[in-house]
Image (spheres, helix red, strand yellow):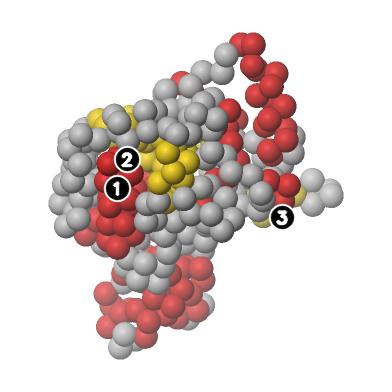
Amino acid sequence: MSPIPAMLLAVTLCGCASNPLPSALDSTDPGRLPTAQRVVSVAGLRPCNNGPERTLNIDPGQPINILVHGCNGSTGRFRTLAEVLAFHGQQTACFEYDDRDSLMVSSGQLARAVDTLAQQMNTPQITVIGHSMGGLVARKAFIDSHPSPSRNTQVDLRLVTVSAPFSGIASARMCAASALRFATLGLNDLLCWLVSGDNWYEITSASGFIRNPGTLIPQVRSHLKIATDERGTCRRRNDADQCIEDDYIFSLGEQQYPPAASMPRTTDVEVAAGHVEIVGESGVTPYKLINVFQREGIIRATPPERLSAFQALLTELYGR
């Protein structure tokens, strides 16, 4: 295979997975809990659905979760996970951004959204949960070297990343190959940009953020880093039970911090699960993620008397 087609294939496979959603949930708004007392409008934040509504209905006295999708995603991808949180009395908003923008731009938008939302809360406690490339955006938003970091010193932040390629996306490695970039007189860069957008170089192992991820700001009291072992996973099977689409996007190596990087306040958890399986989609309930979240205190424990109702909700949301 010649360098240019190979590069295109590599970047096309850079980890942008999408999740089809149950159409029955199109009109729901899981971010609206019975305790909502205030309507707020925050640039970049919206309910976790694909509807036209952009305002949030929140209880300013309660913690809130912000979900950050990966590339080729949308806020509606997390609608069902927001329903799971809502069942446990936890309010949620989704961060809406252009996944073709530079990570610097998207992370700056997220940091500003967190600051603005915190101003609307009595005692701001915010958990930011990012999946896949959304995990890179989320962590970059809260490093002390960011030119536009979160400036609200009163906010209590928790960071959660799931299946995030902190060592860079291996399949995009040719986008950072100096010899290839020179030999193609810039055509390599153009093709990478056409496929991935302004973040095309930032997601490679050669980028400054990947090589030196930085230190989390003091407001972030913890970072739960969930890596998925996606080997041998399958997303779709045919009638003969043969796998026709795997669920392998990032290796464990791609999800590790650069070698010898020491990250204070970070808890590492490894889960054997596919890239989409971990967050769920129609027909696939994210039991493994829910179990980790409840064990680590991200989702409240389900009261024993509500276990059957919770299982019924999961069946309604995910179809099984």
Badge 1 crowding class, 10 Å Cα cut-off, few under 14, some 14 to 19, many 20 or more, is some
Distance from Cα at disc 2 to Cα at disc 1: 7 Å
Nearer to the camera, 297 or 288: 297
Placement of 61 over or under 188, stated as above or below: above
Task: Determine the residue positioned at 70% across, 18% down.
Answer: 308
Q: Amino acid at mark 1?
A: Thr
Q: Which mark is residue 244?
A: 3
Q: Position of residue 6 (x, y in %)?
A: 48, 74
Label 2–label 1 contact, CB within 8 A: yes
- Name the residue type under label 3: Ile
Residue positioned 46% across, 68% down in the render: 11
Task: Determine if residue 69 is in view.
Answer: no
Residue 130 picture location, percent across and down: 42, 45
Rendered location of residue 27, percent (x, y): 66, 49
Q: Residues within 10 Å of mark 2 (few under 14, many from 20)?
A: some
Kind of residue sitting beneath label 2? Gln
Q: Nearer the viewer, mark 2 or mark 3?
A: 2
Q: Earlier in the sequence, mark 1 or mark 3?
A: 1
Q: Is residue 238 above or below residue 172?
A: above
Q: Nearer the viewer, residue 260 or 74?
A: 74
- Find the residue positioned furthest to the bottom: 185
Q: Which residue is mark 1?
A: 116
- Per the model, the C-alpha gap separating discs 2 and 3 is 47 Å
Query: Where does label 2 land, which residue?
Result: 120
- State whether residue 8 appears in this view: yes
* Secondary structure of residue under mark 3: strand
Compared to residue 54, the image places residue 4 above or below, namely: below
